[in-house]
Structure formats: C-alpha cells, structure tokens
Amino acid sequence: MKNNQLNPVELCIKGENLAVKFLKKRGYKILKRNYAGKSGEIDIVAYDKGTISFVEVKTRQSENYGPPELAVTREKRKRIIRTALNYLATNHIDGIDYRFDVVSILFKDDDTNPNIELFKDAFTADGVFN
C-alpha cells in the first residue's frame, strides 16, 4: 500500500511500529508505547545502556513543511518533558539517567524504503520552562 493512501493516524501508527523495530535493532529495550500522562503522550519509553530514553516519533510523507524532526516544537518538547517527569514519578524511578530522543521517518515516494534517522539527546529539559 502506498503511503498516500494512509490517513494521518495510520501513518503515525506505521511510523511508530517502524521506530520500535529500528530502536530494537540498536539495542533499545522497549518499556512502554504510547504512555499517556496528565500533560501529554510519549510515543516510546525505552531503556538504552543504562539510560531511559523518551522517544518522540515524527513520520512524514514529504518535506513540504521541512524534515519530520522539525515538527518537535518548543511547546511539544514542554509537553514531552512534563509527561516524562510524570512517568518517572509515577513509576518511582530515581537515580537513573534519562534523555529525549527523536526518531524521524520520511517516506519520499512509497513505503518500501523510508529514511529513518535517530537524534539522540535531541533536546534537554534545561531551560525549556524559562
């Protein structure tokens, strides 16, 4: 099926599924998908070599509005950070490093060969609430 036949929800699900496979191949252990907290939702919570990674997945079919990773705006980062802090508190996780990663998925012509890119430490909580 060509991606131009997918609605935005289907494209999002397809992107998140690809991101999970991509991350697992790189040694990430998936802890939770679509974690919803009071402030928002985190696509993937994973464990990577001693660090919890909160992963935002952005999937696009074109670069008409720029590359997918640019869709992680300042407001989106704030919601992700608040939700991540809620996840840590709710699960009584303390004393472990955490970071915010972005997986960018771009389908140019069809769904056979998407460009998938991982941005580790894509942003930090420092200064976001200033």
Image: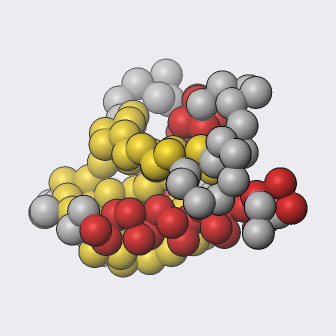
| Residue in front for this viewpoint, 126 or 108 | 108
| Structure colour scheme | secondary structure
Picture quarter with the N terminus: bottom right
Task: Determine whether, in the image, residue 69 is placed left or right of residue 27.
Answer: right
Residue at 31% across, 71% down: 24
69 shown above or below 3: above
Left or right placement of residue 121 versus residue 77 in this view: left
- Look at the picture and state if 128 lies above or below 109: above
Q: Quadrant of residue 4?
A: bottom right
User: Is 67 situated left or right of 28 in this image?
Assistant: right
| Residue drawn 76% across the image and 58% down it | 3
Report x, y in % for residue 6: 82, 63
Q: Can residue 81 be seen here? A: no
Residue plotted at (21% across, 68% down): 27
User: Where 105 sits versus 62, above or below?
Assistant: below
Q: Residue at x 50, y 30 (%)?
A: 129
Note whether residue 25 is visible: yes
12 lies left or right of 103: right
x and y, in percent, of residue 112 in the image: 59, 60
Nearest to the observer: residue 60 or residue 43 = 60
Residue 127 image offset from top left, x and y in percent: 40, 24
Q: Quadrant of residue 74?
A: top right
Image quarter for residue 61? top right
